[in-house]
């Protein structure tokens, strides 16, 4: 991920992609960070925790469908 290009929307889009590929229960903070090529701590700038990520994914999914 290019520095400065990460934001909450990008994090949630990637989380939605990962959830659709591997299942919602397999969505983890560390796995999400790895897929974005950032340290897990860096995600805290954009999301509070994994519950926030999952809530955001559900909202994004509903919005898209």
Image (cartoon, rainbow, N blue to C red):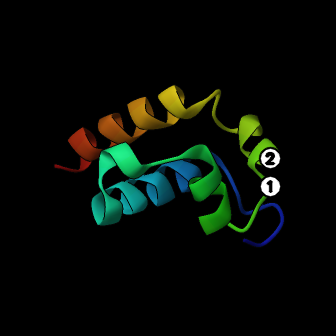
Q: Residue at x 58, y 55 (%)?
A: 32
Q: Which residue is mark 2?
A: 42
As helix, strand or loop, the secondary structure at mark 1 comes to loop
Q: Is residue 23 left or right of residue 9?
A: left
**Crowd class of label 1 (few under 14; some 14 to 19; many from 20; radius 10 Å):** few
Q: Which residue is mark 1?
A: 39
Expressed as whole percent of the image width and height from the top left, the position of residue 15 reads 46, 53
17 shown above or below 40:
below
The CA span between labels 1 and 2 is 5 Å
Camera-near label (1 vs 2) is: 1
Q: Is residue 44 left or right of residue 52?
A: right
Most foreground residue, 34 or 11? 34
50 shown above or below 43:
above
- Residue 31 placement: quadrant: bottom right
* For the residues bearing labels 1 and 2, Cβ distance under 8 angstroms: yes
Most foreground residue, 2 or 21? 21
**Crowd class of label 2 (few under 14; some 14 to 19; many from 20; radius 10 Å):** few
Disc sitting over residue 25 in the figure:
none
Most foreground residue, 8 or 57? 57
Q: Quadrant of the N terminus?
A: bottom right
Give the residue furthest to the bottom.
2
Q: Residue at x 40, y 29 (%)?
A: 55
As helix, strand or loop, the secondary structure at mark 2 comes to helix
Q: Is residue 20 left or right of residue 42?
A: left
Counting every numbered tag in the picture gives: 2
Q: Residue at x 78, y 72 (%)?
A: 2
């Amino acid at each position: 991920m290019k520095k400065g290009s990460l934001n909450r929307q990008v994090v949630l889009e990637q989380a939605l992609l990962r959830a659709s590929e591997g299942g919602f229960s397999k969505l983890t903070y560390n796995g999400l960070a790895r897929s974005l090529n950032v340290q897990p701590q860096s995600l805290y700038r954009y999301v509070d925790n994994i519950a926030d990520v999952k809530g955001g994914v559900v909202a994004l999914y509903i919005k898209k469908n």
